[in-house]
């Protein structure tokens, strides 16, 4: 029977971005708005984010060629594309044979009218949305013109179908965003709402951290992806880059 899953799957959150830095500053000062000029899709990596991406690229490069990613799927957002490119430039892929795809289904969660607002800002400017989010929970709450976690999961189901259709038995690297990392875990591991929110409550997904799955065959089916590590930051720390886990610039209702 044809193996529909990759032989190995890595999911990496983008490196620290200028938006992460701005969001951290806004929260630290209890401000209502996050001060950043670019569209969320255009927010670049910070200098520390570039260092983190280079370090992860070198970590992949230190592995044998047959243990490096040969397919890269990246969010179209600049910070994710820059992370992917720096991993490639550091030798982290299988050289010239690696394939590179930008997939809009891996984009950051859209927050609509709550974009660029801190929790304080949401409570001050949209108290009705703050109350609704409190009642429904982040998994189901959809801000006006934005997405719930369920909406993100819906598009990720389609993205995983593409992975299984076109990249079975390959080694695949996905570079995306915090909520994408969490929602992919929810799908791949067949979790419940309570299970994934409990993982989320334990702490943010670190910038450039690695979540890794390996395919495990089964005598009674096609097998499945088994989690080997989550939020793994040793490649960053050992490479001398700072470990950061700031929220994204559209953090209000992550």
Image (spheres, rainbow, N blue to C red):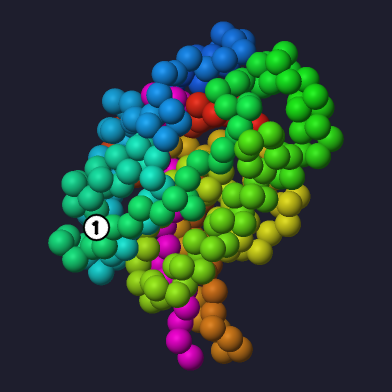
Instruction: Where is residue 102? Give x, y as percent.
Output: 35, 53
Q: Is residue 14 above or below residue 212?
A: above
Q: Nearer the viewer, residue 39 or 70?
A: 39
In the figure, residue 156 lies in which quadrant? bottom right
Secondary structure type for disc 1: loop
Residue in the image at 71% along x and 44% along y = 139
Q: Left or right: where does residue 97 sit relative to residue 60?
A: left
Quick check: is 5 in the magenta stretch?
A: yes
To which residue does mark 1 refer? 93
Q: Is residue 213 above or below residue 123?
A: below
Q: Nearer the viewer, residue 24 or 202?
A: 24
Q: Left or right: where does residue 189 sit relative to residue 54?
A: right
Give the crowd class for mark 1: few <14, some 14-19, many >=20 residues within 10 Å. Answer: many
Residue in the image at 65% along x and 32% along y = 253
Q: Which residues are magenta?
A: 1-20
In the figure, residue 244 lies in which quadrant? top left
């Amino acid at each position: 029977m044809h193996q529909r899953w990759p032989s190995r799957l890595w999911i990496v959150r983008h490196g620290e971005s200028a938006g992460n830095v701005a969001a951290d500053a806004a929260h630290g000062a209890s401000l209502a708005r996050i001060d950043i000029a670019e569209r969320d899709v255009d927010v670049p990596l910070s200098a520390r984010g570039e260092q983190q991406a280079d370090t992860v690229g070198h970590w992949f490069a230190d592995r044998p060629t047959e243990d490096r990613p040969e397919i890269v799927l990246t969010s179209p957002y600049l910070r994710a594309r820059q992370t992917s490119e720096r991993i490639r430039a550091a030798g982290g892929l299988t050289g010239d044979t690696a394939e590179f795809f930008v997939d809009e289904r891996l984009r950051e969660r859209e927050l609509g009218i709550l974009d660029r607002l801190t929790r304080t800002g949401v409570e001050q400017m949209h108290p009705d949305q703050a109350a609704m989010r409190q009642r429904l929970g982040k998994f189901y709450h959809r801000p006006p013109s934005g997405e719930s976690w369920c909406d993100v999961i819906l598009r990720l189901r389609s993205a995983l179908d593409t992975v299984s259709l076109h990249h079975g038995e390959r080694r695949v690297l996905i570079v995306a965003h915090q909520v994408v990392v969490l929602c992919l875990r929810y799908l791949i591991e067949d979790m419940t709402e309570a299970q994934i929110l409990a993982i989320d409550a334990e702490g943010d997904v670190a910038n450039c951290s690695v979540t890794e799955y390996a395919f495990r065959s089964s005598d009674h089916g096609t097998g499945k992806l088994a989690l080997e590590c989550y939020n793994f930051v040793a490649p960053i720390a050992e490479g001398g880059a700072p470990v950061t886990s700031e929220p994204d610039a559209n953090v209000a209702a992550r």
